[in-house]
Image: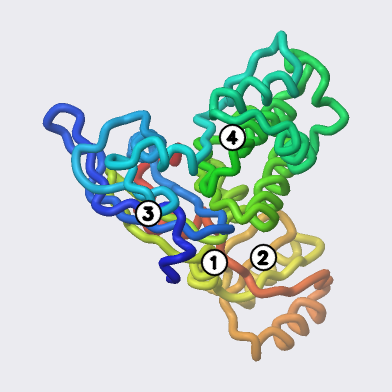
Amino acid sequence: MNEQNIVLKTEGLTKYFGRRRIINNISLQVRAGEIFGFLGPNGSGKTTTIKMILGLLSIDAGKVYIGGCDREKDFENALRQIGGIIENPDTYGYMTGYRNLEYYARLRGRLDRQRIDEVVRLVGLENRIHDKVKTYSLGMKQRLGLAQAIVHRPKVLVLDEPTNGLDPAGMRELRDTLKYLASTEGIAVFVSSHILSEMQLLCDRVCIISAGTVLRTCNVDQLLDEQAHGYRFILRPADLAQSIVDSQLAGRLLARDGETFDLACEESEVPGLIACFMQSGAAVYGVQPALGSLEDSFMEITGGGNTIA
């Protein structure tokens, strides 16, 4: 990994609550322009780690570097290069979205209206930015929160459960906005979420932790490739297809979801299986490699002992 592209780095990050060690030697690196997922079961230490990165909790051992600045030794310069939202963004409902951005920009030390107009376009709020925030939907408030978090041009954007309360359309809007920010602004997005299907669509890399310890850090595509198995057949009618599988393909069924059957087979066997179904009266509507999922990888790596949060 090119050191020049690393904008967020932790080394041996450790935190105790009393005598109990909550965070155990967490080391990670996040590059400019990538979306980095931070995953773990309930109580694994994700939010505690995020609060240490953002300067909201003290560090008992280890280092946090933001844009090359040591968070402990050069706190103000480090925090200037990071923006964050912990769950729901803080906004003033009686003020317009624009006034909220002006206020936040002043808090950050610089009121730049050209930059405000720029981030409003980036998050897609041009048509509503002069309306009062109390009239915004939850998705619009999330977009305004993103605008607040990047108005000072940070190198790193940290988001803890940003999809809380969003409907599927709102999740997609947020996903598209974050991808756009990463590619257009070159911002490193460090995001934690319990919705693994969204993280699979959003992230370039993920770090999976449990009990405050890093278990695995790698590309999402690598995890999915490791979980790939067999081929996925769409078969109709499903009941007939199931009886064919039971009678002629015993032991090959890996998973079934309605009309979708995942079968253990090699690519060379696919034509023969298609012929088997067709000759027995089942129609084959589609065949593709049965890719794994981030959820499958998460459950395997963590042992599935706890639900994610």
Tag nearer the camera, 2 or 1: 1
Q: Is residue 298 left or right of residue 181?
A: left
- What residue is pinned by disc 1? 224
N-terminal of the pair, mark 2 or mark 4, is 4
Label 4 neighbour load within 10 Å: few <14, some 14-19, many 20+: many
**Side of 242 where 34 appears, left or right:** left
Q: Residue at (54%, 52%) from the top-left corner?
A: 188
Question: Mark 3 and mark 1: span between their CA atoms?
Answer: 25 Å
Residue at image x 44%, y 70%?
2
Residue 149's disc is 4
Q: Nearer the viewer, mark 3 or mark 1?
A: 3
How far apart are the two marked residues, 2 and 1, measured between alpha carbons? 18 Å
Q: Amino acid at mark 1?
A: Leu
* Residue 9's disc number: 3
**Where residue 251 sits: x, y (%)?**
52, 73
- Three-letter code for the amino acid on which mark 4 is drawn: Ala
How far apart are labels 1 and 4 at the CA level? 31 Å
Q: Residue furthest bottom?
A: 268
Residue 20: image x %, image y %? 16, 33
Q: Which of label 3 and label 2 is nearer to you?
A: 3
